[in-house]
């Protein structure tokens, strides 16, 4: 008989898929590490299992306990799945930014969901972090996972994602491109890869509206960097312990619009129905493409599945509402090379500057 003991045994060992169509304009070979092949359809299965099992080993998570976490969705789903299989309760606080589909998914696994305002500051009692803390104190025998500060988060990727990528590329990987949220996926994998080959470039992806890239550049936590944005899971308004800033070679910011268009492009060109942050990571590959050489091997991590965004990036109405379909080509914000439309405008303005005076005089005559 060939079977798995439970879905937990199917976590990890996700495929590496060559991106030959979307990657055509890029001189290097580009592979996607596609995490939606996990049973919970995201990379968060790996960390949820590791954080729970490590807490069990240390005796912090006791039989009959309730797992509490502040999560934008994916970690919550994975925790709820694992909690139900292992016989724990699960209470999750989420921000109002999470899609309705995500909330339904959490509830489908038996989790109790508490929705908190997305614009509440992290130290505001209304924020999803503070609410989770409060609940973990109120609920008897509760265990607060704290994925941002729980080092078993990056540990999971150090022990699984890193070795998988190293093996799958036969050690040929030269660039690892990964979204930064809690930092676990990025830092754990990067730590393993750098130990294998310190020359591998680690490229972190951040959202406009998040504090991480500026903190990496300057060491300053700049509150003025914070504003609301659309991409879920990417970026932070706090500095999580799981972001290991020392392993990062470059931080690249991406826009909501370009990330949304890249997400749709991944589905259309590669048949990969992946999530919004996957499009953000792909957009990052485009932004760094001028530094890539033909012999380079780029691995870009796609954190979750696209079904969770059917009402957002895969919905034309939502895209139009946000002005993301005005000009369907992602703007090349990376380069100094202006887009076709900008070039025409520049030529027109230069022409007007040079010859406008004569034109006016001619018309007067
Ligand atoms: C969809 C999605 N993308 C990216 C991330 C960022 O991953 P990490 O928290 O490991 O940095 C998350 C984390 O919540 C996520 O849910």
Image (cartoon, grey):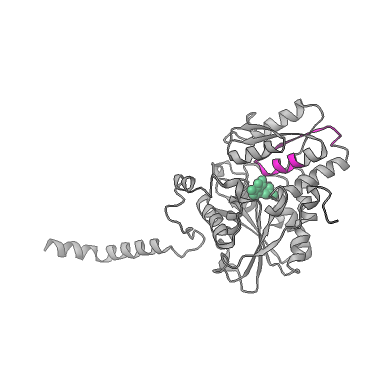
Magenta stretch bounds:
61-81
Residues 23 and 36: in front is 36
Does the magenta run of residues contain 62?
A: yes
Is any atom of residue 339 visible in this view?
yes
Q: Residue furthest left?
A: 365
Q: Is residue 109 left or right of residue 339?
A: right
Residue at coordinates 78% horizontally, 38% vertically from top-left?
Answer: 84
Q: Relative to 106, does residue 162 appear above or below in the rendering?
A: below
Is any atom of residue 151 visible in this view?
no
Residues 150 and 45: in front is 45
Q: Quadrant of residue 198?
A: bottom right
Residue at coordinates 74% horizontally, 62% vertically from top-left?
Answer: 165
Q: Quadrant of residue 75?
A: top right
Give the x, y percent position of residue 230: 54, 45
Image quarter of the C terminus: bottom left
Residues 340 and 217: in front is 340
Give the x, y percent position of residue 92: 70, 35
Give the x, y percent position of residue 316: 48, 49
Q: Is residue 99 left or right of residue 153?
A: left
Does the magenta run of residues contain 157?
A: no
């Amino acid at each position: 008989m060939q079977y798995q003991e439970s879905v937990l045994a199917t976590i990890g060992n996700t495929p590496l898929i060559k991106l030959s169509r979307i990657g055509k304009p890029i001189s290097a070979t580009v592979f996607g590490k596609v995490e939606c092949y996990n049973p919970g359809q995201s990379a968060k299965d790996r960390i949820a299992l590791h954080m729970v099992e490590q807490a069990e080993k240390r005796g912090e998570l006791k039989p009959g306990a309730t797992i509490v976490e502040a999560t934008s969705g994916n970690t919550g789903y994975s925790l709820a799945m694992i909690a139900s299989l292992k016989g724990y309760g699960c209470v999750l606080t989420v921000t109002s930014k999470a899609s309705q589909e995500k909330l339904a998914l959490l509830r489908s696994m038996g989790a109790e969901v508490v929705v908190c305002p997305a614009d509440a500051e992290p130290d505001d009692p209304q924020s999803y972090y503070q609410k989770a803390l409060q609940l973990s104190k109120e609920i008897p025998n509760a265990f607060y996972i704290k994925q941002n500060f729980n080092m078993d988060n990056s540990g999971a990727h150090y022990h699984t994602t890193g070795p998988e990528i190293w093996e799958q590329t036969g050690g040929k990987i030269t660039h690892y491109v990964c979204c930064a949220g809690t930092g676990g996926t990025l830092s754990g994998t990067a730590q393993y890869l750098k130990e294998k080959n310190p020359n591998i470039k680690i490229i972190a992806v951040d959202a406009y509206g998040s504090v991480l890239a500026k903190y990496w550049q300057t060491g300053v936590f700049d509150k003025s960097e914070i504003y609301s944005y659309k991409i879920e899971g990417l970026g932070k308004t706090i500095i999580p312990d799981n972001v290991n800033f020392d392993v990062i070679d470059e931080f690249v910011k991406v826009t909501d619009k370009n990330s949304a268009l890249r997400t749709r492009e991944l589905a259309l060109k590669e048949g990969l129905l992946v999530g919004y942050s996957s499009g953000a990571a792909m957009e990052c590959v485009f932004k760094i493409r001028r530094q890539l050489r033909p012999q380079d091997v780029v691995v870009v991590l796609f954190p979750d599945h696209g079904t969770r965004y059917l009402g957002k990036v895969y919905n034309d109405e939502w895209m139009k509402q946000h002005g993301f379909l005005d000009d369907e080509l992602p703007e090349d914000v990376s380069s100094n090379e202006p887009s076709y439309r900008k070039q025409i405008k520049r030529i027109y303005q230069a022409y007007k500057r040079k010859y406008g005076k004569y034109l006016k005089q001619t018309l007067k005559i």
